């Protein structure tokens, strides 16, 4: 048997540059990111619970940090991540039943997931502030 001297170029697999970013792809990426962000948010919740169990001074310190403008911004982001991840999970649950897999309906659901998570986050914060006695 003889060896051939010709080298054939191997085909390259598609790279990110050949894909166009579509809403369902973007929501899939954001769903993964929010899932990771929820780990960080749960740590914040555990710190708050531990501070409540520790002492009044520790609890006041943690509440002061969470009540600052930066703390509220982080908590607002956590709320959005939680609601967005939940709505994305419901979208995937619907897909598991075989419904909503058409291109038009999956795109509409992706856009609805983003809009719904923003609207629900704002509503949750409005209700939270109203329950505390106003803004």
Image (cartoon, rainbow, N blue to C red):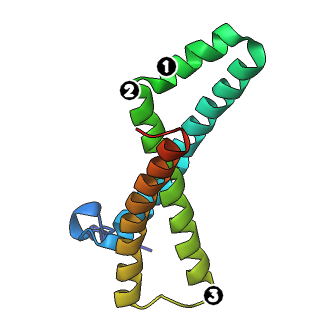
Q: Quadrant of residue 106?
A: bottom left
- Tell me where residue 33 appears, x and y as whole percent: 46, 50
Number of the label disc, if any, that sits on residue 97 = 3
What is the CA distance from the residue labelled 3 to the residue labelled 2?
Answer: 41 Å
Point out the frontmost of discs 3 and 1.
1
Q: Is residue 132 left or right of residue 69?
A: right
Q: Quadrant of residue 71?
A: top left
Residue at 57% in and 67% down? 89
- Tell me where residue 29 appears, x and y as whole percent: 41, 59
Q: Is residue 22 left or right of residue 121?
A: left
- Tell me where residue 74 appears, x and y as whole percent: 43, 34
N-terminal label among 3 and 1: 1
Report the residue marked by disc 1.
65
Name the one closer to the observer, 101 or 123.
123
N-terminal label among 3 and 2: 2
Mark 3: few, some, or many residues within 10 Å (few <14, many ≥20)? few
Residue at 54% in and 38% down? 132
Quadrant position of the N terminus in the picture: bottom left
Q: Is residue 29 visible?
A: no
Report the residue marked by disc 2.
70
Farthest top residue in view: 57
Mark 2: few, some, or many residues within 10 Å (few <14, many ≥20)? few
- Tell me where residue 11 appears, x and y as whole percent: 30, 71
Q: Is residue 127 visible?
A: yes
Q: Quick one: SS at disc 2?
A: helix
């Amino acid at each position: 048997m003889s060896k051939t001297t010709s080298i054939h170029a191997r085909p390259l697999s598609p790279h990110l540059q050949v894909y166009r970013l579509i809403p369902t792809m973007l929501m899939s990426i954001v769903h993964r990111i929010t899932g990771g962000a929820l780990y960080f948010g749960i740590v914040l919740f555990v710190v708050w619970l531990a501070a409540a169990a520790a002492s009044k001074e520790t609890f006041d310190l943690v509440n002061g940090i969470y009540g600052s403008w930066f703390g509220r911004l982080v908590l607002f982001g956590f709320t959005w991540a939680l609601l967005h991840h939940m709505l994305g999970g419901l979208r995937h649950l619907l897909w598991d039943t075989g419904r909503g897999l058409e291109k038009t309906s999956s795109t509409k659901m992706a856009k609805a997931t983003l809009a719904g998570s923003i609207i629900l986050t704002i509503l949750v914060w409005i209700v939270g502030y109203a329950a505390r006695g106003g803004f």
